[in-house]
Image (spheres, grey):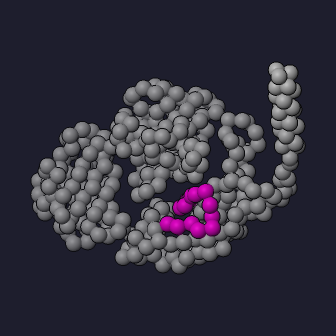
Amino acid sequence: MKKNILIYLTFIGLTALFTACEKDGEKITFLSDPNPPVLTTIPDLTLQRSNGNSVLEFVGTPVDPGFQASAAYYIDVCAAGTAFADFVTVWSGSQCKSMKITVSDLNGALIKKFPADASTALDFRLRAVLVVDAGTGAPGTGTQTFSYNSESKSVTAALYGLPRLNVVGSGITQKIESALGDGNYMGYIKLDPANPFTLNNPDDGKNYGGSADVLSVNGPAFIPEVTGWHKMTVDVNGLTYKLLPFRVGLIGSATPNGWNAPDQKMEYNAQGGFWHITLDLVVGYVKFRANDDWNGGINLGNGDASHPEYNLSNLWNNGSSKDIPIDAAGNYTVKLIIGSSTYSCTITKN
């Protein structure tokens, strides 16, 4: 009986071995000249603040390297005729057949580089980057990405400027803006308790102040509790506001303090709308968080096997997000963009 069992188990083992070898012998063919993605449809880009919540749809066809491949897709925009020497990415995701973005999000991304309240000739392209497991050192990882661009499409976009409240008295020229023009304003401003400030609406001349989260016309000056960057939200309809310290930091085993506070604090570039820092990193991992606290509303990293759509161009704001690898020691410039519903970053070795 034991002999029969042994023979049976041996048979199963040999069958598994041959099956594995057969699978190992399967080959895929990588085209020497893969078919790039195609940006087939661009919606009407006469953007209006009154339609800020409307959804625009871009349509494309995927890259074809000769086999079924996973790819990350990006919509890049540059001034017409500049060959994408200086571009802004306005959308990213894991598929390109239906790429959707709200009017306010697209307008907000474009006016960081192109003039508001004006029509500008722009070139759009669809960029595909094949997804390859990181950390292997193989072609397609790190700086050796397999990236393919569609032919560009030229369109004229009419962009609108955002209603704003100017920050008066902070010692710096600053403002907070209303993405939808609905009386709700938000912005990141740098403050000092020694410089109380008020808000001025340049469109109607009204001045605002307040205390204890209550906004009032011609009210008392706002006095921040601490020095540094703050996130301010204002509702001029409901006459309320929030003013909270807000500082994004880089944390992780690749940073000078490891996984311990204080984080490596980033500065905010109001013109470009991004947080940034230049620092030395070692081989290891990083993530982003706010106010040295995992519960500060920001916990940004990569996706996992169940969420491959999250990557550096589409960070995952979730406690389950994965650490971002730093594969080589050196001096890096890190930029982080916090959108209304999306997050993206670049980590560039200098």
Q: Residue at x 87, y 42 (%)?
A: 22
The quadrant holding residue 247 is top left
Farthest residue to the front: give it: 1
- Quadrant of the image containing the C terminus: top right
Q: How many marks?
A: 0
In the displayed structure image, the side of residue 189 where residue 38 appears, left or right:
right
Q: Residue at x 55, y 45 (%)?
A: 303
x, y (%) of residue 113?
A: 50, 62
In the displayed structure image, the side of residue 82 where residue 165 appears, left or right:
left
In the displayed structure image, the side of residue 296 where residue 308 appears, left or right:
right
Q: Nearer the viewer, residue 209 or 136?
A: 136
Q: Is residue 232 above or below residue 284?
A: below
Q: Residue at x 47, y 55 (%)?
A: 342
Q: Residue at x 35, y 41 (%)?
A: 296
Is the stretch drawn in magenta largely helix, strand or loop? strand
x, y (%) of residue 181?
A: 32, 70
